[in-house]
Image (cartoon, helix red, strand yellow):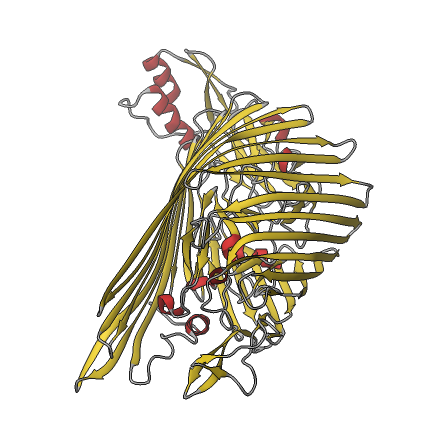
Amino acid sequence: MVLQQIAFTHNVQFNYNSNLIKNTYTYPVSNKLNLNEKLKTLEVQTGFVFTHIDTQIIGISSPLVICGYIKDITTKTPLIGATITTKKSHAITNNEGFFKLKVKSSSEKINIRFVGYHTMTQLASELASTNCKNLYLTEYQELISNISINGYLVKGIDKTINGSTTIDFTKFTLLPGLIETDVLQTVQALPGIQSVDETVSNITIRGGSHDQNLILWDGIKMYQTGHFFGLISSFNPKITQTATVINNGTDASYSNGVSGTIHMKSNNELQTDFTGSLSLNFINANIFADIPLGRKSSLQIAARRSIDDWIKTPTYQNYFKRVTQSTEIENNDKNVTNSNQDFNFYDTSLRWLYTPTNKDIIRVNFILIDNNLTFDETAIVHNSTETKQSSLSQQSIAGGIHYRRKWTPKFSTIIQLYETDYNLQATNANILDNQRFFQENIVSETNIKLEAAYTKNNWKYSGGYNFVETQITNRNDVDNPRYLRLFSNVIREHAIFGQTQYHNSYSNITIKPGVRVNYIKKFNQILIEPRLSIYKKISNTFSLEILGEFKHQNVSQVIHFQNDFLGVEKRRWQASDNDSIPILKSKQASIGFTYKKKQWLIDATGYYKKVDGITTQSQSFTTKYEFSKNKGSYNAFGIDFLLRKNFKNLSTWLSYSFIQNTYSFDNLVEKQFSSNFDITHAATIGGTYSNKLFNMSLGLNYTSGKPTSQPVLGNEIVNDEINYGTANNSRLKNYLRADASALYKKQLTDDISVNIGVSVWNLLNTKNTINNYYRIEHNNANKYARYSLGTTPNFLLKLNF
């Protein structure tokens, strides 16, 4: 009756099998609705599919049920969370990689997607529910990032044919002491990368200081890398999908970072379904959402904030004590009392992806990072109690636009523009002297890059132009007596770069030579920087890698006084003046061999690196030469070694690094002596067990003590100054730390899962000295030390939906 009424009203005919609609009843359909609205109403009431065969004939059929198991083509393991989409419906695979979905027609196209894999398209007729077959997806790898070693350390950490190491957090399992994918903590597990004081803001790559590293987030240079003033990464783990670590053989499109490059990247695939997560640990709360905006656009939002306003956990208290030890915040003048110490941090990341056509990709990025520390100082002055507040803030804000156009299958172009700003401020209230000391360090950088790439057969050619303008401002402001020093410096640099890559899969060789030509306008100086990467697979088990590069950078971090910025974040960025602060220039070469057979891997690389233009102020001296202002260089040569053995669900590894890192300063008493970053021996042994429900990891870290200087015994003070012996002629005690972590994963429904994790940093509560210094008190040279974190637990609860 309802069909007859619709057919009469709209002058259409229905085509169907009479047995299909037999004993099917519906409610009356309002005549106020148009034809399509009436058909949709009937679809909801009956479950039938109404299809326009032509303008006047409408077919009625039952929906088709399709199903399948989505798996990795290499490992044959299920891909959990893969999306299966049609024009009007979707499904997500469960723990077995299984999905089931209703579609309207057997001719409907089904798209199957999983992050990091090629998209598969199937007809619904091939996926009928009568035979739920296995469907295998192939991992997506671009030519320039072909993997040479899968699971280099654990699953998700791979080594590429151009010598870099990639970390894919969508596949990542677990490392000792970590329960979240903290990028800058994770990279320290790689041979040749350490932190001399356990922070992510003091990472050394093959003997270089942290400011010599180029840290990029989606192509945007970041001048701030840590929360809690360096104890955790400032980059939200939910929005960062991959990270590439480059020790040598850097791509010609990169500038700066004479020591190494860490490039963090977010997911560039549009999601057709809403996904998100909520997480909470003993330090912060985190929220993430990936929101589709139609079929061509999506918005990713991530936000994280410390939870100390609500509860000060043992983890927070350990972190706060570690950051503020041996500073004015912890130990003020004996006549001054500190109170109301308050610290908090937050970060916000936003990404908008837009693909107007299948040839165009537009990406807009925004990030805001903020750390704030305040405390009150109270003293009795002129028989009355006075209280003033001291504060420290560290903030970064950056935004960028990235546009890629694929003109043909062989030719593409990229335009990228970003602005990044960093601001460090401190107000030190000196009650006893009625003085306020204000310090500020500001970095503002604008970058424009144009790049083109052309691929033909085994060759890939790329080149482009890059412009960078960096302005750095430093301010010291004292109110009593009045003193103001404001210094600002701007450096503009133009560069052209080009490189080619030859890859022959039959002869198993990849060669990538390149060159970058830089012109620094302020100094009227041209710097030519060749780059080289060679990979050769000698046999099924052996491969050879040769890397080399010239690089430079125009900015560095310096320390004027150890109590700058309240002694918490003492380093300030400063631009080169090509005189007292030279342009940093580096040369590096390395050769490596890899043996890989079955589940065994041996990887060894020897390298030599020379960096000119360093200053004593940039090298974190705390003993001899702490107040010196001299320029020089360092030479580093060493070996990075990794032995890895995989079992069915267990990855085990032993990594070892040896380095001999030597300073050269012509104007110092000692012309050559050990670098402050000469961690001669560093070794890690660890293992990670993982299955569908559990990840567990345990590791032991050892490093030899860092160099330090000692006063001359029996003649410690000369002319009211500490009389040190030979520079860096002794070392701190060796460093030893055991870590453990565990993560439980549970799929609650097809759309919701939960992660519960626990970790323990410094499991054995080893007291490690990370730095020392001396001060004259009562005509004595008293020794002080800063110590590493003690046993520090953490807990994670994360809901994925």
**Is 55 or 750 nearer to us in this picture?**
750
Q: Is residue 243 above or below residue 716?
A: above
Front residue of 502 and 617: 617
Q: Position of residue 305 (x, y in %)?
A: 38, 59
Q: Is residue 77 above or below residue 361?
A: below
Q: Is residue 322 visible?
A: yes
Left or right: where does residue 647 sit relative to residue 455?
Answer: right
x then y, percent, for residue 408: 55, 20
Query: Which of the 4 image quarters holds residue 703?
Result: bottom right
Q: Residue at x 47, y 55 (%)?
A: 799
Which quadrant is home to the N terminus? top left
Q: Compared with residue 435, is residue 520 higher up or lower down, i.e. above or below?
A: above
| Residue 441 location (% of width, % of height) | 35, 56
Q: Position of residue 468 (x, y in %)?
A: 43, 39
Q: Is residue 22 left or right of residue 504?
A: left
The answer to whether residue 308 is left or right of residue 86 is left
